[in-house]
Image (cartoon, rainbow, N blue to C red):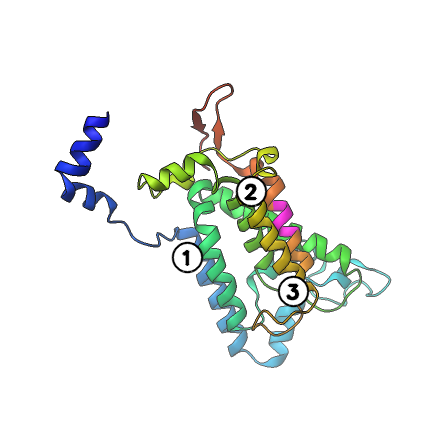
C-alpha cells in the first residue's frame, strides 16, 4: 500500500496533480436554489411599492404578536392560521436589505456547503426549516406580543455552523484533508455530543460564536446591517443545529468499530 502511494506521489506527479485539481468552491445546487430565491425575493421587495412591501412583511415575516390574542384580535394580520404556521419558516427568505441578504448567503455558502454535501437535498431542506422554526420559537418566547417583524436567514446559518461543528473537527476529517480528499466532510461519522463538549477546537469555535452573538445582543456595532439583530433567534438556530444534528445525519459509526456506514440519502 505504501509502495503504491509512493509510485503515485513520486513517480507519477502529473496524475497526482490532476487528482487534486478540484474547484475551490463546489456549491451544492440546493444552496444555489436557496440563494437565487432569497435574491429574487429581495429584488421583488425593492421593486414593489411601499404598501405592497408592508403586506409582504405582514404575510410572511415572523411577528410574535400573531400568537398573543390579548394584543391582536383574530384577523388583524393576513394569512390566518396558515400564516401562523408558515411564518415560522418563510421569514428566513426575507431580508432587511442587500447587505443583510449578502452576509447571510456568504455564511450559508461557507457553513451550509459541507452540511448539504453530507445531508443530501431533502435532509438539508428539512434541517433548514427545523433551525428556522427553532430560531423563531426562541424569538417568540423572548419577544412575546411584539409587533416588530423578524426577518432573515441568520437562525439557519447558525444552525449550519453548529451542524458543521459536529463533524468538521473529527480526527478522520483532518486526515482526509491532509490526504487531499475534498469530500472528507461528507464521509466520516460525527462526534458524539459528549466528545464535542470535550473538544478544544469545537469549544473554541462555539465560544467565538457565543461571544459574537452576545456582542450583537448588547448592541456592539459589529455589523453593517441596520436594525435590531434578533440574537435570540440566532441562538435558537444554533442550539437546534447542535442538539438535533443526529436526527438528520445520514452517516453512522458502526458499533464497536472505527468503521462507518451511510444510510440512504433522501
Query: In terms of secondary structure, where does tag 2 sit?
Result: helix
Q: Which of 243 and 46 is in front in this view?
A: 243
Image-based side of 94 in relation to 257, left or right: right
Image-based side of 263 in relation to 51, left or right: left
**Which dot marks residue 200?**
2
Alpha carbon distance from label 2 to label 3: 24 Å
Which residue is depicted at the point 59% across and 49% down?
A: 206
Percent from the top left, x then y, of residue 225?
Answer: 58, 72
Provide the residue designation for mark 1: 32
Above or below, 164 relative to 198: below
Above or below, 50 relative to 67: below
Predominant SS of the magenta segment: helix
Q: Residues within 10 Å of mark 2 (few under 14, many from 20)?
A: few
Q: Give the range drawn in magenta.
A: 236-240
Image-based side of 16 in relation to 252, left or right: left
Provide the residue designation for mark 3: 216
Q: How crowded is mark 1: few (under 14 residues within 10 Å), some or many (20 or more)?
A: few
Percent from the top left, x then y, of residue 246?
Answer: 56, 35
Percent from the top left, x then y, of residue 18?
Answer: 19, 45
Which residue is depicted at the point 20% across and 46% down?
A: 17
* Residue 135 in which image quadrant: bottom right
Which residue is depicted at the point 63% across and 54% down?
A: 210
Q: Nearer the viewer, residue 226 or 33?
A: 226
Alpha carbon distance from label 2 to label 1: 33 Å
Amino acid at each position: 500500500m505504501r509502495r503504491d502511494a509512493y509510485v503515485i506521489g513520486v513517480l507519477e506527479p502529473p496524475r497526482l496533480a490532476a487528482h487534486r485539481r478540484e474547484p475551490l468552491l463546489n456549491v451544492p445546487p440546493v444552496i444555489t436554489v436557496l440563494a437565487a430565491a432569497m435574491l429574487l425575493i429581495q429584488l421583488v421587495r425593492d421593486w414593489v411599492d411601499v404598501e405592497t412591501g408592508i403586506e409582504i412583511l405582514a404575510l410572511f415575516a415572523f411577528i410574535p404578536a400573531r400568537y398573543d390574542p390579548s394584543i391582536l384580535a383574530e384577523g388583524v394580520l393576513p394569512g390566518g392560521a396558515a400564516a401562523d404556521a408558515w411564518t415560522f419558516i418563510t421569514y428566513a427568505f426575507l431580508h432587511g436589505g442587500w447587505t443583510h441578504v449578502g452576509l447571510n448567503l456568504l455564511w450559508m455558502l461557507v457553513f451550509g456547503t459541507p452540511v448539504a454535501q453530507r445531508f443530501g437535498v431533502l435532509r438539508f431542506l428539512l434541517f433548514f426549516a427545523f433551525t428556522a422554526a427553532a430560531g423563531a420559537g426562541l424569538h417568540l418566547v423572548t419577544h412575546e406580543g411584539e409587533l416588530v417583524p423578524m426577518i432573515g436567514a441568520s437562525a439557519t446559518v447558525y444552525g449550519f455552523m453548529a451542524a458543521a461543528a459536529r463533524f468538521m473537527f473529527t480526527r478522520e476529517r483532518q486526515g482526509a484533508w491532509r490526504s487531499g480528499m475534498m469530500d472528507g466532510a461528507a464521509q466520516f461519522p460525527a462526534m458524539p455530543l459528549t466528545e464535542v463538549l470535550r473538544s478544544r477546537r469545537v469549544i473554541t469555535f462555539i465560544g467565538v460564536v457565543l461571544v459574537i452573538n452576545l456582542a450583537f445582543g448588547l448592541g456592539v456595532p459589529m455589523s453593517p446591517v441596520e436594525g435590531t439583530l434578533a440574537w435570540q433567534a440566532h441562538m435558537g438556530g444554533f442550539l437546534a443545529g447542535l442538539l438535533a444534528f443526529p436526527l438528520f445525519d445520514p452517516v453512522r459509526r458502526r458499533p464497536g468499530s472505527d468503521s462507518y456506514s451511510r444510510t440512504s440519502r433522501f
